[in-house]
Image: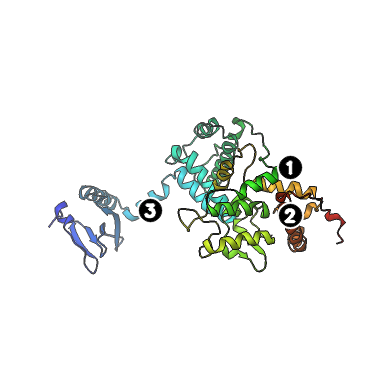
C-alpha cells in the first residue's frame, strides 16, 4: 500500500523505530522521538545499501519519490547512489560564512577570548549581512571593497582596515584549504583611507587626576560600576581585563590578582599586586557579588560581566567627554605619573603587561620584578590618596632605592 500525506501525518512514534514502505525500496523510518526519515533500500554489487533522502516534511512525499526515481536511474547506469551523493556533497562550493567560521575556529585557540569575540563580531556586523551566502569561489575584490567602504563611510577607518586584514587572512586560509584558487582580498587596504593613529584620551595632570578621583567617589549610579571605576586607576589593567575579572582569580589575603593567559592580549598570564586600597574596594564589593562568578556582574544577569561600554558610559555620566578621558586612559595616567615619580621603566612596563621583545628575558622578568611591582603599586595607591586629599605630593624617586 502506497503512502499518502494523510497517512504519513498520522504515523505515531513507538518504543522502537519502524519502517513504512512506499514501494520499490523507498520507505519512511519513524523514530521513537517522532522523526520521519526517508530512506531508499537497494542492492549494489551484491551488497545491501541504504540511501538517506531527507526528513519529512522538509522533503515531501512527491520530492522523496522524485529522488527515489533519480537514484534508480543511477543504478541502471551502474552507479552507486550513495557514492554519487557523497561526491556531490564534497564538490559543493563553500560560502564565505562557512569558510570564515572554519578559519575563526582554527585561529581562536591562539587568541584571547576577547579578541576572538571581537574578530567574529566585526565579521558578523560589517561583512556577513551582505556576503555570507556568496560562494567563496565567486567573490571579487570589488564586492569585498564595497563592504569595507560601507564601514569606512561611517568614519570607522581603522575598523575598515582591520576587517580588510581579517578578510585577507580568511582567503589565505581558503586558498590553502583548496576552497578557492585566488585571494581577492590581498591588496584591499591599498584602496582604503589611511588611518592616523590617535593617542587615547587620558587625564595625566595631578590636579585633574584629583578632580577625577573625587568625581568617581561621588558617582551616583550602580554600586558595582562605582567600585569598578574606583579600582581602575589602582590596577590600570586593560578595560576588558578589569570588567571580566573573576573572584577565583583574586587572592585577597595574598593581595594578588592573577589574570589567566586566555584573557590577556598577549596570551600570557599576568600578575597584578593589589594595594591595601584595592583590597578594601574588593572587600566592600564581596558581600554583593562574591557568591557569583564575576567581580563586576551585569545589572541584568550575574552570568555576564558589565559590558565593554559600561565604564566609558560612566565617565560620560560624570561629565568627561570621550575627547577628555576613556577607560583605557587609566593606563596612560599611571604610566605617565609613575615615570614622573621616578619608577624604573622596566617595572612600569612589566605591570602594564607590555611583553618584552626578548621572550626569554620576559619570562625571567615576570618573577624578577614582582617585589618591586608590589612596592610600586602600593606607592601609587598612596599617591592617589594623597592627591585626592589635597596633600602636597613629593616625587618618589625609585632610583634612590638600593637594588
Real-space CA distance between mark 3 and mark 1, rounded to the nearest whole angstrom: 68 Å
**Quadrant including the C terminus:** bottom right
Q: Residues within 10 Å of mark 3 (few under 14, many from 20)?
A: few
Residue 28 screen position, x and y as percent: 22, 58
Q: Earlier in the sequence, mark 1 or mark 2?
A: 1
* Residue pointed to by mark 2: 380
**Of 146 and 118, the residue lying toward us:** 118
Real-space CA distance between mark 2 and mark 3, rounded to the nearest whole angstrom: 66 Å
* Residue pointed to by mark 3: 86
Residue 331 screen position, x and y as percent: 68, 48
Query: Are circles 2 and 3 on residues that touch, CB within 8 Å?
Result: no
Residue 387 screen position, x and y as percent: 73, 49
For the point 71% across and 53% down, the residue is 385
Q: Residues within 10 Å of mark 1 (few under 14, many from 20)?
A: few
Q: Residues within 10 Å of mark 2 (few under 14, many from 20)?
A: many
Q: Earlier in the sequence, mark 3 or mark 1?
A: 3
Is residue 118 found left or right of 64 in the rendered image? right
Give the numbered dot on residue 346.
none
Is residue 225 found left or right of 33 in the rendered image? right
Q: In the displayed structure, would residue 57 be above or below residue 285? A: above
The residue most toward the left is 1
- Classify mark 3: helix, strand or loop: helix
- Classify mark 2: helix, strand or loop: helix
For the point 27% across and 63% down, the residue is 33
* Residue pointed to by mark 1: 205
- Classify mark 1: helix, strand or loop: loop
Is residue 84 found left or right of 33 in the rendered image? right
Q: Earlier in the sequence, mark 2 or mark 3?
A: 3
**Looking at the image, is mark 3 or mark 1 nearer the viewer?**
1
- Res. 356 in view: no
Amino acid at each position: 500500500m502506497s503512502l499518502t500525506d494523510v497517512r504519513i501525518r498520522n504515523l505515531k512514534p513507538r518504543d522502537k523505530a519502524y519502517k513504512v514502505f512506499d514501494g520499490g525500496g523507498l520507505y519512511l523510518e519513524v523514530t521513537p522521538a517522532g522523526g520521519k526519515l526517508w530512506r531508499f533500500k537497494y542492492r549494489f554489487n551484491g551488497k545491501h545499501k541504504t540511501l538517506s533522502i531527507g526528513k519529512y516534511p522538509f522533503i515531501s512525499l512527491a520530492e522523496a519519490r522524485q529522488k527515489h526515481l533519480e537514484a534508480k536511474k543511477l543504478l541502471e547506469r551502474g552507479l552507486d547512489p550513495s557514492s554519487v551523493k557523497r561526491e556531490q556533497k564534497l564538490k559543493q562550493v563553500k560560502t564565505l560564512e562557512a569558510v570564515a567560521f572554519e578559519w575563526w575556529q582554527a585561529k581562536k585557540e591562539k587568541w584571547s577570548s576577547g579578541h576572538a569575540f571581537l574578530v567574529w563580531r566585526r565579521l558578523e556586523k560589517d561583512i556577513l549581512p551582505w556576503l555570507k551566502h556568496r560562494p567563496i569561489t565567486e567573490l571579487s575584490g570589488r564586492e569585498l571593497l564595497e563592504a569595507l567602504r560601507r564601514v569606512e563611510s561611517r568614519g570607522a577607518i581603522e575598523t575598515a582596515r582591520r576587517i580588510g586584514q581579517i578578510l585577507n587572512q580568511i582567503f589565505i586560509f581558503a586558498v590553502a584549504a583548496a576552497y578557492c584558487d585566488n585571494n581577492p582580498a590581498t591588496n584591499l587596504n591599498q584602496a582604503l583611507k589611511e588611518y592616523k593613529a590617535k593617542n587615547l584620551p587620558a587625564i595625566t595632570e595631578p590636579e585633574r587626576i584629583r578632580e577625577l578621583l573625587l568625581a568617581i567617589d561621588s558617582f551616583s549610579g550602580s554600586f558595582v560600576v562605582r567600585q569598578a571605576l574606583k579600582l581602575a586607576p589602582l590596577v590600570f589593567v586593560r578595560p576588558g581585563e578589569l570588567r571580566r575579572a573573576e573572584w577565583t582569580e583574586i587572592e585577597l589575603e595574598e593581595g594578588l590578582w592573577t589574570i589567566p593567559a586566555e584573557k590577556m592580549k598577549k596570551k600570557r598570564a599576568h600578575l597584578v599586586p593589589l594595594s591595601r586600597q584595592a583590597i578594601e574596594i574588593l572587600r566592600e564589593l564581596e558581600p554583593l557579588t562574591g557568591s557569583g562568578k564575576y567581580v563586576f556582574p551585569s545589572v541584568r544577569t550575574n552570568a555576564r560581566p558589565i559590558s565593554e561600554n559600561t565604564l566609558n558610559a560612566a565617565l560620560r555620566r560624570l561629565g568627561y567627554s570621550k575627547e577628555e578621558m576613556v577607560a583605557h586612559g587609566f593606563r596612560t595616567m599611571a604610566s605617565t605619573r609613575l615615570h614622573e615619580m621616578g619608577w624604573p621603566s622596566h617595572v612600569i612596563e612589566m605591570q602594564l603587561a607590555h611583553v618584552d621583545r626578548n621572550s626569554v628575558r620576559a619570562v625571567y622578568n615576570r618573577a624578577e620584578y614582582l617585589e618591586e611591582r608590589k612596592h610600586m603599586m602600593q606607592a601609587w595607591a598612596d599617591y592617589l590618596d594623597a592627591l585626592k586629599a589635597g596633600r602636597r605630593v613629593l616625587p618618589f624617586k625609585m632610583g634612590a632605592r638600593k637594588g
